[in-house]
Image (tube, helix red, strand yellow):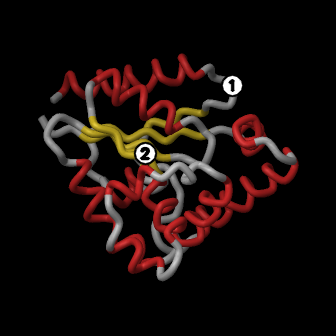
Amino acid sequence: MIFTVAIDGPAAAGKGTISRAVAAHFGFAHLDTGLLYRAVGAKGGDPVEAARNLTEGDLGRDDLRTLEAGQAASRVAVIPEVRAALVTFQRGFARREGGAVLDGRDIGTVICPEAEVKLFVTASAQVRAHRRWLEVGGDEAQVLAEVIERDKRDADRAVSPLKAAEDALVLDTSAMTIDAAVAAAVAEVRRRLAKE
């Protein structure tokens, strides 16, 4: 069975946690596409070459979840040649046998517009900054400023801006527990699977 779940949204909205839970629930493969861009940014050097030569091993680095890697990812993600180099990898993963969940910022709009399920997971900038601050520490006001800056950069980029697909189910997790958000996502996938 080929079945793609596309989960998009801004940083720290909960899309990674929801994606992993949905993949585990249904036995689907999972790809955090943000790691692709983080790995490209972390490799340094020419980002286009880094993207073209990216391997699955590069996604296992232990420094890809840092704020620095996130900022580097956002910078290289605006380069059209980097995005193009990573599209084929993502599309191949999405249409693998056995089902796949991909989370990112443009999965439902650009990478997999034909995905069987599209979710857009969001939350207020303040809630997301607080969550990120609990993860990484530091100055909470600075984390909020970085979240707002990244949101603007991701939404304003010319290529593949961050936005919900027209047919996506929007989950605002600002006031939801993670269990409630996962349950809503699982219910949507189950509903679509029943139609297949």
Amino acid found under the numbered disc labelled 1: Ala
Q: Residue tagged by mark 1?
A: 175
Q: Name which residue lies at 27% across and 60% down.
A: 89
- Tell me the quarter of the image containing the C terminus: top left
Q: Name which residue lies at 17% across and 45% down.
A: 96
Assign a secondary structure to mark 1: loop
Q: Nearer the viewer, residue 111 or 166?
A: 111
Q: Is residue 183 left or right of residue 141?
A: left
- Tell me the quarter of the image containing the N terminus: top left
Q: Residues within 10 Å of mark 1 (few under 14, many from 20)?
A: few
- At which x and y percent is residue 169? 45, 36
Amino acid found under the numbered disc labelled 2: Asp
- At which x and y percent is residue 102? 36, 45
**Quarter of the image holding residue 98?**
top left
Q: Residue tagged by mark 2?
A: 103
Q: Residues within 10 Å of mark 2 (few under 14, many from 20)?
A: many
- At which x and y percent is residue 2? 15, 39
- Numbered circle sitting on residue 128: none
Q: CA distance from mark 1 to mark 2?
A: 21 Å
**Quarter of the image holding residue 53?**
bottom left
Q: Is residue 119 left or right of residue 134?
A: left
Q: Is residue 142 left or right of residue 58?
A: right
Q: Name which residue lies at 40% across and 58% down.
A: 58
Q: Name which residue lies at 32% across and 27% down.
A: 189
Q: Nearer the viewer, residue 114 or 180?
A: 180
